[in-house]
Image: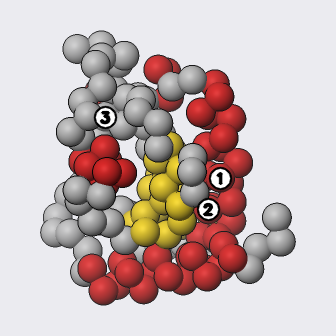
Amino acid sequence: MSIRGDYDPNNIFAQILRGDMACCKVYEDKHVLAFMDVFPQAPGHTLVIPKEAGRNLLDTSDEVLAKAIPRLKKIALGVEKAFSPDGIIITQFNGEPAGQSVFHLHFHIIPRFDGQHFDRHGKGEPADKDVLHAQAQSIANAITKLDI
Protein backbone atom coordinates (compact mmCIF):
# COMPACT_ATOMS: atom_id res chain seq x y z
CA MET A 1 0.00 0.00 0.00
CA SER A 2 1.28 3.45 -0.81
CA ILE A 3 1.77 6.25 1.68
CA ARG A 4 -1.39 7.82 0.29
CA GLY A 5 -3.58 4.75 0.74
CA ASP A 6 -7.21 4.75 1.72
CA TYR A 7 -8.24 6.29 5.03
CA ASP A 8 -9.66 3.76 7.48
CA PRO A 9 -12.52 5.44 9.38
CA ASN A 10 -12.17 2.78 12.10
CA ASN A 11 -8.55 3.53 13.02
CA ILE A 12 -8.02 4.15 16.73
CA PHE A 13 -7.75 7.95 16.37
CA ALA A 14 -10.98 8.11 14.35
CA GLN A 15 -12.60 6.09 17.14
CA ILE A 16 -11.27 8.56 19.72
CA LEU A 17 -12.58 11.50 17.69
CA ARG A 18 -16.04 9.89 17.51
CA GLY A 19 -16.00 9.23 21.25
CA ASP A 20 -16.01 5.46 20.74
CA MET A 21 -12.71 5.15 22.60
CA ALA A 22 -11.47 7.10 25.62
CA CYS A 23 -8.32 9.21 25.79
CA CYS A 24 -6.51 11.36 28.34
CA LYS A 25 -7.43 14.68 26.74
CA VAL A 26 -5.03 17.61 26.94
CA TYR A 27 -6.64 20.12 24.57
CA GLU A 28 -9.51 20.27 22.11
CA ASP A 29 -11.04 22.83 19.80
CA LYS A 30 -12.94 22.56 16.51
CA HIS A 31 -9.75 21.79 14.54
CA VAL A 32 -7.58 19.48 16.68
CA LEU A 33 -7.58 17.10 19.60
CA ALA A 34 -4.50 16.57 21.79
CA PHE A 35 -4.15 13.67 24.21
CA MET A 36 -1.53 11.62 26.02
CA ASP A 37 0.17 8.75 24.21
CA VAL A 38 -0.70 5.53 26.06
CA PHE A 39 2.70 4.09 25.13
CA PRO A 40 4.81 7.17 25.95
CA GLN A 41 8.44 7.40 24.99
CA ALA A 42 8.93 9.85 27.87
CA PRO A 43 6.69 11.43 30.53
CA GLY A 44 4.49 14.08 28.90
CA HIS A 45 4.44 12.44 25.45
CA THR A 46 1.45 14.11 23.81
CA LEU A 47 -0.28 13.46 20.48
CA VAL A 48 -1.99 16.13 18.38
CA ILE A 49 -4.44 15.09 15.67
CA PRO A 50 -6.47 17.15 13.23
CA LYS A 51 -10.17 16.40 13.43
CA GLU A 52 -10.39 16.09 9.65
CA ALA A 53 -9.71 12.61 8.27
CA GLY A 54 -6.34 12.13 6.59
CA ARG A 55 -3.83 9.28 6.65
CA ASN A 56 -0.76 11.48 6.94
CA LEU A 57 0.75 14.87 6.13
CA LEU A 58 1.05 14.10 2.43
CA ASP A 59 -2.68 13.64 1.87
CA THR A 60 -3.93 16.35 4.23
CA SER A 61 -5.07 19.68 2.82
CA ASP A 62 -3.03 22.82 3.32
CA GLU A 63 -6.06 24.39 4.99
CA VAL A 64 -6.16 21.68 7.66
CA LEU A 65 -2.40 21.94 8.18
CA ALA A 66 -2.63 25.75 8.44
CA LYS A 67 -5.03 25.32 11.35
CA ALA A 68 -3.23 22.39 12.98
CA ILE A 69 0.34 23.73 13.09
CA PRO A 70 -0.29 26.83 15.26
CA ARG A 71 -2.23 24.62 17.66
CA LEU A 72 0.60 22.06 17.66
CA LYS A 73 2.95 24.89 18.66
CA LYS A 74 0.58 26.08 21.41
CA ILE A 75 0.31 22.56 22.84
CA ALA A 76 4.10 22.08 22.63
CA LEU A 77 4.52 25.33 24.57
CA GLY A 78 2.14 23.91 27.17
CA VAL A 79 4.22 20.72 27.38
CA GLU A 80 7.34 22.86 27.79
CA LYS A 81 5.74 24.94 30.55
CA ALA A 82 4.38 21.87 32.37
CA PHE A 83 7.55 19.73 32.21
CA SER A 84 10.46 22.20 31.80
CA PRO A 85 12.41 19.75 29.60
CA ASP A 86 15.89 20.33 28.18
CA GLY A 87 14.42 19.89 24.70
CA ILE A 88 11.29 18.80 22.87
CA ILE A 89 10.95 16.42 19.95
CA ILE A 90 8.09 17.19 17.58
CA THR A 91 7.74 14.50 14.96
CA GLN A 92 5.34 13.07 12.42
CA PHE A 93 5.63 9.88 10.33
CA ASN A 94 4.31 9.13 6.82
CA GLY A 95 3.81 5.44 6.03
CA GLU A 96 4.58 2.27 7.94
CA PRO A 97 8.24 2.04 6.82
CA ALA A 98 8.73 5.54 8.26
CA GLY A 99 7.33 4.45 11.63
CA GLN A 100 3.66 5.37 11.28
CA SER A 101 1.49 2.87 13.17
CA VAL A 102 -1.87 4.69 13.23
CA PHE A 103 -2.99 5.92 9.84
CA HIS A 104 -4.57 9.21 10.85
CA LEU A 105 -2.30 12.26 10.67
CA HIS A 106 -0.79 12.86 14.09
CA PHE A 107 2.10 14.73 15.62
CA HIS A 108 4.16 13.57 18.61
CA ILE A 109 5.35 16.09 21.21
CA ILE A 110 7.97 14.41 23.38
CA PRO A 111 9.75 16.22 26.24
CA ARG A 112 13.44 15.29 26.47
CA PHE A 113 15.81 15.56 29.38
CA ASP A 114 19.59 15.19 29.24
CA GLY A 115 20.54 11.66 30.27
CA GLN A 116 16.93 10.41 30.37
CA HIS A 117 16.17 6.96 28.95
CA PHE A 118 14.19 7.18 25.71
CA ASP A 119 11.80 4.29 25.12
CA ARG A 120 10.96 2.91 21.68
CA HIS A 121 7.47 3.88 20.64
CA GLY A 122 4.69 1.35 21.19
CA LYS A 123 6.84 -1.10 23.12
CA GLY A 124 6.14 -2.47 26.55
CA GLU A 125 3.07 -1.98 28.70
CA PRO A 126 0.68 0.97 28.49
CA ALA A 127 1.31 3.79 30.94
CA ASP A 128 -0.73 4.08 34.13
CA LYS A 129 -3.98 5.93 33.29
CA ASP A 130 -3.88 7.96 36.54
CA VAL A 131 -0.38 9.17 35.69
CA LEU A 132 -1.47 10.06 32.14
CA HIS A 133 -4.52 11.96 33.42
CA ALA A 134 -2.36 13.93 35.88
CA GLN A 135 0.12 14.79 33.11
CA ALA A 136 -2.73 15.80 30.80
CA GLN A 137 -4.14 18.10 33.48
CA SER A 138 -0.71 19.67 34.06
CA ILE A 139 -0.31 20.39 30.35
CA ALA A 140 -3.89 21.66 30.02
CA ASN A 141 -3.35 24.02 32.97
CA ALA A 142 -0.10 25.26 31.42
CA ILE A 143 -1.82 25.90 28.09
CA THR A 144 -4.46 28.07 29.76
CA LYS A 145 -1.70 30.19 31.31
CA LEU A 146 0.11 30.83 28.04
CA ASP A 147 0.12 34.40 26.78
CA ILE A 148 -0.46 33.62 23.10
Image x and y of residue 60, in percent: 51, 25
Q: From what the image shows, is residue 96 above or below residue 109? A: above
Is the C terminus in the top left, top right, bottom left or bottom right quadrant? bottom right
The image quadrant of residue 65 is top right
Label 1: how many Cα within 10 Å (few below 14, some 14–19, many 20+): many
- The amino acid type found where label 1 is placed reads Arg
Q: Would you say the residues marked 3 and 1 are in contact, meaning their CB atoms lie under 8 Å apart?
A: no
Say which of 40 and 116 sits in front. 40
Dot 3 alpha-carbon crowd within 10 angstroms: few under 14, some 14 to 19, many 20 or more? many
In this view of the protein, can residue 30 be seen by the observer?
A: yes
Q: What residue type is disc 3 on? A: Phe
Residue that carries the numbered disc 1 in the rendered image = 71
Contact (CB < 8 A) between labels 2 and 3?
A: no
Nearer-N-terminus badge (3/1):
1
Q: CA distance from mark 3 to mark 1?
A: 20 Å
Question: Which numbered dot is residue 103?
Answer: 3
- State the residue position of label 2: 75
Whether the residues at callouts 2 and 1 have beta carbons within 8 Å, the answer is: yes
Name the residue at 48% across, 59% down. Answer: 34
Q: Where is residue 147? Give x, y as percent.
A: 83, 71
Task: Identify the image quadrant of residue 62.
Answer: top right
Q: Secondary structure at mark 3?
A: loop
Q: How is the image coloured?
A: secondary structure
Locate the N terminus by quadrant.
top left
In this rendering, the answer to whether 119 lies above or below 113 is above
